Image: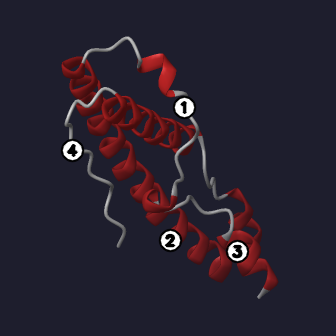
Amino acid sequence: MLVLAVVLAGCATKSEDVAPSYVSPYQFEALTCSQVAEESQRIAQRANELAGVQDSKRTKDTVATTVAVVVFWPAAFLVSGDDRNTAELARLRGEMQALEQVSIRKRCGIQFQRPTTG
């Protein structure tokens, strides 16, 4: 049972559980409101792509872990877990928060939607 718990901890994180990294809003201060909107759309699109990759990776890791534990438990330690994809998703979410702060400060009136959690 301990082996299963250790191995499952090595699986990739669900995209909805990836917390944003801190990004300073000051790097976006020079942007106009329309540029804030454009940058937000670009980042949101990339973050959505990465969230799909992250969830797919989590599913694959879970299946691989289950098979490894049942068939050959030492292989379970080869499950990859979190990686650069997770780090980039966290950074992008941090950038979205920073852009939202700039938008509020400049009174751009842009509506930012938070990802829904399942």
**Label 3 or label 4, whichever comes before in sequence order:** 3
**How far, Cα to Cα, is label 4 from label 1?**
19 Å
What number is the disc on residue 111? Answer: 4
What number is the disc on residue 23? Answer: 1
Residue shown at the point (44%, 33%) measured from the top left: 98
- Which mark is nearer the camera, 3 or 2? 2
User: Which residue appears farthest toward the right when viewing the image?
Assistant: 2
**Label 1 or label 3, whichever comes before in sequence order:** 1
According to the picture, the residue beneath numbered tag 2 turns out to be 63
**Label 3 or label 2, whichever comes before in sequence order:** 2
Disc 3 + disc 2, Cβ < 8 Å: no
**How far, Cα to Cα, is label 4 from label 2?**
38 Å
Q: Amino acid at mark 4?
A: Gln
**How far, Cα to Cα, is label 3 from label 4?**
50 Å
Disc 1 + disc 3, Cβ < 8 Å: no
Q: Amino acid at mark 2?
A: Val
- Which mark is nearer the camera, 2 or 1? 1
Expressed as whole percent of the image width and height from the top left, the position of residue 70 reads 64, 83
Rendered view: 84 above or below 39: below
